[in-house]
Image (cartoon, rainbow, N blue to C red):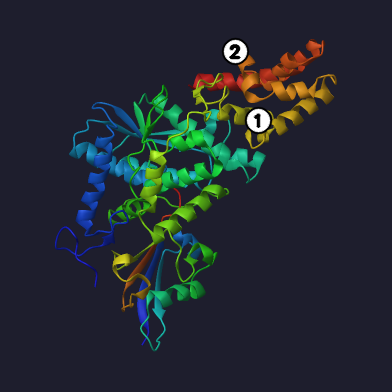
Amino acid sequence: MSIPITLEFSGGAELLFDRQKRHDINLPKQEYPWRIQELLPWIRDNILKERPELFLQGNTVRPGILVLVNDTDWELMGELEYNLQPNDRIIFISTLHGG
Amino acid sequence: MPLKCGLCDKQAILKRPKTGDALCKECFFLAFEEEVHQTITDANLFIKGETVAIGASGGKDSTVLAYVMKALNERYAYNLNLVLLSVDEGITGYRDDSLESVKRNEIQYCLPLKIVSYELYGWTMDAIVKQIGLKNNCTFCGVFRRQALDRGALMLKVDKIVTGHNADDIAETVIMNVLRGDIGRLRRCTAITTGTDGALPRCKPFKYTYEKEIVMYAYFKKLDYFSTECIYSPNAYRGFARAYIKDLEKIRPSAIIDIIHSGESLSVKKEVKMPVQGVCVRCGYISSNTVCKACVLLEGLNKGRPRLGIGKTHKERLKMAEDLNEKGDSSINSQNFFENGQLDSFSEQSSQSGLSCCRSTTAGCSCQTSEICNDTAGIHSSVDQQKINSLAIDF
């Protein structure tokens, strides 16, 4: 069974995704649970349109991009280790743009 | 499952970078606002009855600043008269869009808005970029924006300007000034209020506020802000400092506040020569040179030598002197020009008439044929004077 989740990019992060802020996606079925750690490369390979280095750094998001899991700071949710659930809403907000 | 709020029983939504506390939405809002209030009262930033301009770009920091200033002004009866002040740099596809968000803020927050345009210099950034290209345009924009904000504030007759500079910005600036060896700015850059010596005071109520919290606050309050990179080249040097600070924050979140603390605690040895803050002889704006950077940049633009105020100034001035030699009198001593043509010495002579460096060439000229030199100078200076006089009127 695939996992339907919603991704949102804002604060300038959407510029790397053709300015599209909201993406409703289905993560393909896999043997182990999907964690954000696996979600990030999936995003890079499937929906990121340009300059992956502005979104990812190493195996995580670039410092300065905030991540929220269902409107909660991912730092309280285990960050990369968080197990994605169906209908989760993951938000990426860049703090690196303008002021 | 997420943690409980450290202050109440609700579910936490955010981990505070400064303290590591987990807080719920309401407790976060309150803690955020109260800390800004604390910063304001600790530093005695405002006096009752003052008119304060909020420098508003339409971006996250100034949008949150406007919102919080309005809220605190009401909650704690600061009795301030708040206005929004924006600068239109004339960047199509960037500033025009962000100004739309400021105009929405004007209505949402019921604050009057004033927009000052770079037209007051006779040059939009779009036109400047056509002249200078994409490499040094940020220099023009930064210098002109700073002045334009002051000019707008003077037109509005405000007592103070507040800007949305946050803790991350200030830590970045400390690092940049260390890397550049700019001791004068290093000493000034952590001050919460600057410009108290005559010019309009500028304050930074978000001096200790983390960027992460500003963005989270805007997100949870659903504030309407604009976030697009400027279409012209980003400030590369600041970009590196920025990435560096964010990397540090990831490893140890208190690094940002610690860098600010280091900057605040620095004391400069007595032997170190510091630039003396004076006023520009041409426009009266605060400057550590006789002629301020904006006037030098403007002179360059108006003379078709846009690189005049960029990088190694003397190189460009030398080239200008050589060109003049070819056109005018070949006996002008360019070594002499070089010495006299440096900003500080030439500009004193130009103080009365708003002249260009050409006349100083004459003054420093070792030859006897001053008429020719003066003629050449006259051609340039009359053009220059027109521009500068019109500037003076704008004031």
Can I make out residue B256 in this image?
yes
Task: Name the quadrant containing residue B8.
Answer: bottom left
Q: Quadrant of the N terminus of chain B?
A: bottom left
Q: Which residue is mark 1?
A: B300
Q: Nearer the viewer, residue B147 or B28?
A: B28
Q: Nearer the viewer, residue B186 or B133?
A: B186
Looking at the image, residue B190 sits to the left or right of residue B122; the answer is left
Q: What residue is shown at x 37% (from left), y 51% (from top)?
A: B211
Q: Which residue is mark 2?
A: B352
Q: What residue is shown at x 38% (from left), y 69% (from top)?
A: A7
Q: Which mark is residue B188?
A: none
Q: Pointer 1: residues within 10 angstroms few (<14), some, or many (20+)?
A: some
Amino acid under label 1?
Gly
**Residue B67 image offset from top left, x and y in percent:** 29, 44
Q: Are marks 2 and 1 on the same chain?
A: yes
Amino acid under label 2?
Gln
**Residue B385 image offset from top left, x and y in percent:** 62, 18
Task: Name the quadrant containing residue B126.
Answer: top right
Looking at the image, residue B144 sits to the left or right of residue B20; the answer is right
